[in-house]
């Protein structure tokens, strides 16, 4: 596990965006695993700038980590909307090769199997971006999720619902379930970048790096992956 400590959120974003662009230059038809939330926003903003300066996204395939159950694609808090607003509509990516789980699928279990199958058909994920929850979750894999899990429906922990309520009008509006890539799915990526910014993530980062590998801290499984880079700012790294 490689750990890169930078000064602040902007430095974290710049470092990760540079790594993503290097991946695209090495392999223009890369399969990228993408994250949402506040942590990668700076990365996506910089990728848009890289595109304006000539970076080519046309051959990429992308798979998002997760999507809320029950939100339509055009809901302002859906991850479909998030990706369109923050990246997809601003670069030359082929929309036919951008994949996000369907949180409105009539048969959610079948949707999970379909999504897992699409990742396999694409040859697996070359580079997976991850954030981390204050409780150590990756994707929406909450504490207690088995390390053998593949794409599945998850019940969101109260702490996750509380953390995400800042994006909604009220906590009551936050969906209680999501579809998420499983931990096994994430660990099958050839390379992983975990980003974290702010003191609220310091305990989770400490447990990820120094704690035992345990389902109580899902991100701790990253200790077992051969190619993980943590890019964390000084506040998030304060306990390391």
Image (cartoon, rainbow, N blue to C red):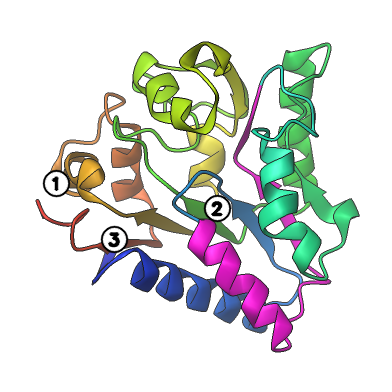
Q: Which residue is mark 3?
A: 232
Q: Which of marks 3 and 2 precedes in the sequence?
A: 2
Between the C-alphas of marks 2 and 3, the distance is: 20 Å
Q: Nearer the viewer, residue 1 or 82?
A: 82
194 up-or-down from 64: above or below:
below
Tell me, yes or no, if residue 218 can be seen here: yes
What element does badge 1 sit on? helix
Q: Are marks 3 and 1 in contact (CB under 8 Å)?
A: no
Left or right of 23: which side holds 110? right
Taking the spot 40% from the left edge, 24% from the top edge, the residue there is 160
Left or right of 218: which side holds 70? right
Q: Give the residue furthest to the front.
A: 169
Taking the spot 34% from the left edge, 22% from the top edge, the residue there is 143
Between the C-alphas of marks 3 and 1, the distance is: 15 Å
Taking the spot 56% from the left edge, 81% from the top edge, the residue there is 22
Q: Residues within 10 Å of mark 3 (few under 14, many from 20)?
A: many
Q: Which residue is mark 2?
A: 189
- Quadrant, the N terminus: bottom left
Numbered range of the magenta stretch: 41-68
Quadrant of residue 226 within the rendered picture: bottom left
Taking the spot 35% from the left edge, 32% from the top edge, the residue there is 218
Asked if the stretch drawn in magenta spans residue 44, the answer is yes
Which circle marks residue 210 in the picture? 1
Left or right of 204: which side holds 22? right
Q: Nearer the viewer, residue 99 or 74?
A: 74
């Amino acid at each position: 596990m490689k750990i890169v400590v930078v000064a602040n959120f902007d430095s974290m974003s710049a470092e990760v965006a540079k790594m993503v662009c290097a991946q695209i230059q090495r392999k223009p038809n890369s399969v990228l695993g993408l994250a949402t939330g506040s942590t990668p926003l700076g990365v996506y903003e910089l990728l848009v700038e890289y595109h304006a300066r000539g970076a080519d996204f046309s051959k990429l395939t992308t798979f998002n980590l997760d999507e809320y159950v029950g939100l339509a694609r055009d809901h302002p808090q859906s991850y479909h909307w998030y990706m369109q607003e923050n990246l997809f509509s601003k670069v030359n990516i082929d929309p036919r090769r951008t994949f996000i789980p369907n949180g409105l699928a009539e048969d959610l279990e079948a949707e999970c199997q379909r999504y897992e199958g699409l990742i396999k058909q694409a040859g697996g994920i070359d580079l997976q971006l991850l954030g981390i929850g204050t409780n150590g979750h990756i994707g929406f894999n909450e504490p207690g999720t088995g390390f053998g899990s593949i794409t599945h429906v998850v019940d969101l922990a109260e702490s996750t619902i509380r953390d995400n309520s800042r994006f909604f009008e009220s906590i009551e509006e936050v969906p209680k379930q999501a579809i998420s890539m499983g931990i096994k799915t994430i660990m099958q990526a050839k390379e992983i970048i975990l980003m974290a910014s702010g003191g609220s993530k310091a305990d989770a980062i400490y447990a990820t790096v120094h704690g035992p590998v345990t389902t109580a801290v899902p991100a701790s499984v990253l200790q077992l992956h051969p190619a993980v880079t943590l890019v964390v700012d000084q506040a998030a790294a304060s306990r390391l």
